[in-house]
Amino acid sequence: MALLLDIPHVMTARALLERDRPAMPADGPSKDGGANRDSRWSFEQLRGQLVELCGGNASAALSFSARLIVQAQQADAPVAWVTAGESLFYAPDMLENGVDLGSLAIIWPRDVTQVLRGVDALLRSGGFGLVIVDISEGAKISLSQQNRLARMAERHEATVVFLRGTPLGQARAPRGDASQKRSKKTGSSALRVSLRVEASRARAPSGRFHCTLRALKDNRRAPGWTDKEVRRGTPGLR
């Protein structure tokens, strides 16, 4: 944990409650993590992997992230959320999902370089079981950095989940775009993860949503599997 003292903008998620108003019951199925530990999308099943969790406009990425956080906390595995985004998740929603905000470390440097440094420090400490990384879709992570993170995740049986927007391969650059050619050649913006999933939601009756997780890539199992659950929508979506 001493390594975190050298990383700026460190706090716990409980501090976010001071800026967010109380919420109605959010989109959490229960406070037990939402699924059994034998599910392919569970903290125990994802240990030691780099994972990419994608979502578009109708995304359920935060809902499926909350499931992992709850399960990790129930297993007494420290959890951290690292982001360079302009905003964070809505804290009362996470609280309603069963997340212990006081035990969720937030690292918010708002700079991609510092984000990667923070993730590196968390894994190197060997003290964190789950690290959620929220970075922009165009953020560049070198292959050597990814390999280093993958080695440390495997060594410490930790899980690193990268939150992204549109799954890679769906957002195409214009034909002849030089940046697209460079990306294909260097892989600088692509993530070489062992598991890539897409989370989506569809409105159901009574203000609920059908949330679906679909495996686009799975090096440990065959891709194509799905994980489904029904959740209550947040107040703004009802």
Image (cartoon, rainbow, N blue to C red):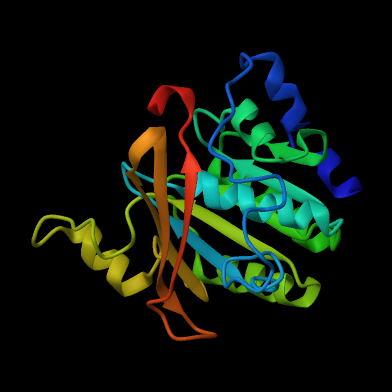
Q: Is residue 128 above or below residue 151?
A: above
**Residue 191 seen in this snapshot:** no
Q: Is residue 68 above or below residue 15?
A: below
In front here: 7 or 17? 17
Q: Residue at x 73, y 56 (%)?
A: 71
In front here: 196 or 111? 196
Q: Is residue 13 above or below residue 74?
A: above
**Residue 201 seen in this snapshot:** yes
Could you tell me residue 103's position as x and y percent?
82, 40
In front here: 65 or 134? 65
Most distant residue in the front direction: 206
Q: How many marks?
A: 0
Could you tell me residue 188's position as x and y percent?
41, 64
The quarter of the picture where residue 58 lies is top left
Q: Residue at x 38, y 51 (%)?
A: 55
Task: Judge left or right: residue 95 versus residue 5.
Answer: left
Task: Judge left or right: residue 209 versus residue 89.
Answer: left
Most distant residue in the right direction: 2
Q: Residue at x 72, y 41 (%)?
A: 99
Task: Judge left or right: residue 192 versus residue 79.
Answer: left
Could you tell me residue 140's position as x and y percent?
45, 55
Q: Residue at x 42, y 75 (%)?
A: 225
Could you tell me residue 97's position as x and y percent?
64, 40
Work out which quarter of the rendered image holds the C terminus and state it. Answer: top left
The quarter of the picture where residue 108 lies is top right
Q: Is residue 39 above or below residue 23?
A: below
The quarter of the picture where residue 182 lies is bottom left
